[in-house]
Image: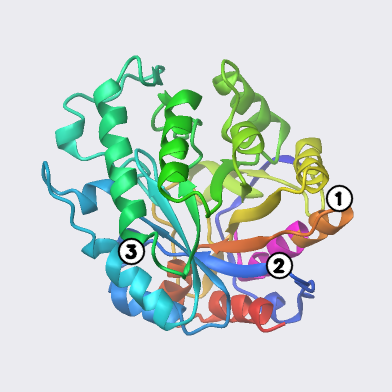
Amino acid sequence: MGLRITRAEQPLTDRWRTTPVESRGATRLGISFRPLQAEGFGLEPRATLATLLEHPYEVVRLAALWNRMEPSPGVFDPSHLDWQVEAAERAGKQVIIAVGAVKNFGYPEVFVPRHHLSTPLKEGSLVGEASHPELLAAALGFVGRVVERFGGRESVVAWQVEHEAVDPLGVEHSWRLTTGFVKREMAEVRRLDPGRPILLNGFLAMSVPVAAQQWWRTRDQGDSLSLAEEAAEIIGVDFYPCHALAAAGGLSAYMSAREGAWPERARRVVERAAANCRRLMVSEGQAEPWEAVTTPPSPVGRAMASCPPERVIQNYNQCLVLGRESGGALDAYLFWGAEYWLLRRQGGDGSYLEAFDRVVTN
C-alpha cells in the first residue's frame, strides 16, 4: 500500500469477464448521476440518465445544485432536478437527494450562486455561522425549498446534507465548513421531514500518507466521517483505492492500496456502525479512473491504470467482504463513474458497463 509509478495507459484486457463477483445479499446497489459530467463528456444528460436507468439496480443519487436551481436572487427553479427525479421514478428507482447546499457531489463540488458569495471563501479558514451568517441563512433557505419540493415523493428514501461535509476540497481549496454550519442544515432537514434519514459521507483514506494529511488538515474539528458517525442516520464512505498524484511523460504516480488491504479505521467504522445499529453505505465506490487531470481520459483500446474495468468489480468485492468480515452488511453500494461507462461505450469499449451489469445481475 503506497506510492506506485507506472504508465497511465495500460492494455485493455478481458479480465473483467472472469473476475468473481461477491454475492450482495441484502445490499442495495446503485449509482450517482452527474449531469454536468455528462455534458463535459459531450453526452446529452437526459439521454444518458435514461440509458443508465434501464439497468437493474435499486438506488440513484441525485444532486440539487444550488446555482442551477437558484439562477438569480429570489428565483427557485427546480426544473434542473425535477426531470431527473421523474425519470428515476418512472424507472422504479429509489432516490437519494443530495440537498447541498454549499458543497455537492460532482466537479467542481461548490455550487453557491454568485449572488450569495460576493468574494471567494478565504483559503485556510473555517466557514461557519460567525464568519458567514448570510451564507448560512441562504443555505438554510435553499435546503428548505428542496425538501419541501421533493419531500412528498415516495421515491425519495434519504437526504444527503453537504458533500464530504467538513473536509477541504482536495488540493483546490483549503477552506472548510464548520460542524455547526452542517448541523444547522441537518436540523432544518429534520424539522421539515423528520421521517427520512440523513446521509453524511466522508472520504476514506486508503494509505498512511493520505490519512496523515487528512488528519492534519481537519484536526481542529474532525473530518467528515467522524461527523457522520456522530450525527447521521446513514454513514456514507467514499472509497477510492487508487488515485493519481502527478503525471509526466506518459508515467503517473499513484497512491494505490493493495487489494484486500484495509486501513484500521475502515474496520472500526464498519464495526461501530454494526454495534450501534447504524446504516452504512459506500456512497461512492470507485468505478472510473482518477487520474492527474480533472476529466478522466478515455484512450481508444486502452484503460487508465487507476481503474481498468475489472476494478469496477474488484472494488465492489472488497467492500462487500469488509462488511461481512467486520460484522455488518452494507446497506447500499453506489458505483461512481456511470457517465464514464457510456463515454467508453460510445468510443467502442463496452467493458465498464458490462462489468457493472455482471455485478447488478449476479
Label 2 vs label 3, nearer the camera? 2
- Name which of mark 1 and mark 3 comes first in the sequence: 3
Q: Could you tell me which residue is drawn at 29 percent across and 71 percent down?
A: 83
- Name which of mark 2 and mark 3 comes first in the sequence: 2
- Name which of mark 1 and mark 2 comes first in the sequence: 2
Q: Compute the Cα span from label 2 to label 3.
A: 26 Å
Q: Is residue 292 above or below residue 295?
A: above
Res. 213 image quadrant: top right
Q: Which mark is residue 27?
A: 2
Q: Which mark is residue 326?
A: 1
The colour scheme of the drawn protein is rainbow
Q: Main secondary structure of the magenta part?
A: helix
Considering depth in this image, is 110 or 135 the residue closer to the camera? Answer: 135
Q: Which residues are magenta?
A: 305-319
Asked if residue 43 can be seen in this view, the reply is no
308 in the magenta segment: yes
Mark 1: give few (<14), some (14-19) or many (20+) Cα within 10 Å: some
Label 1 vs label 3, nearer the camera? 1
Residue placed under numbered mark 3 in the picture: 35
Give the secondary structure at mark 3. Answer: helix
Mark 3: give few (<14), some (14-19) or many (20+) Cα within 10 Å: many
Q: Which mark is residue 247?
A: none
Q: Is residue 331 above or below residue 100?
A: below
Image location (x, y in percent) of residue 140:
32, 37
Give the secondary structure at mark 1. Answer: loop
299 in the magenta segment: no
Q: Could you tell me which residue is drawn at 52 percent across and 66 percent down?
A: 31
Image location (x, y in percent) of residue 108:
34, 45
Q: Amino acid at mark 2?
A: Thr
Q: Could you tell me which residue is drawn at 53 percent across and 48 percent down?
A: 198
Say whether marks 1 and 2 touch (CB < 8 Å).
no
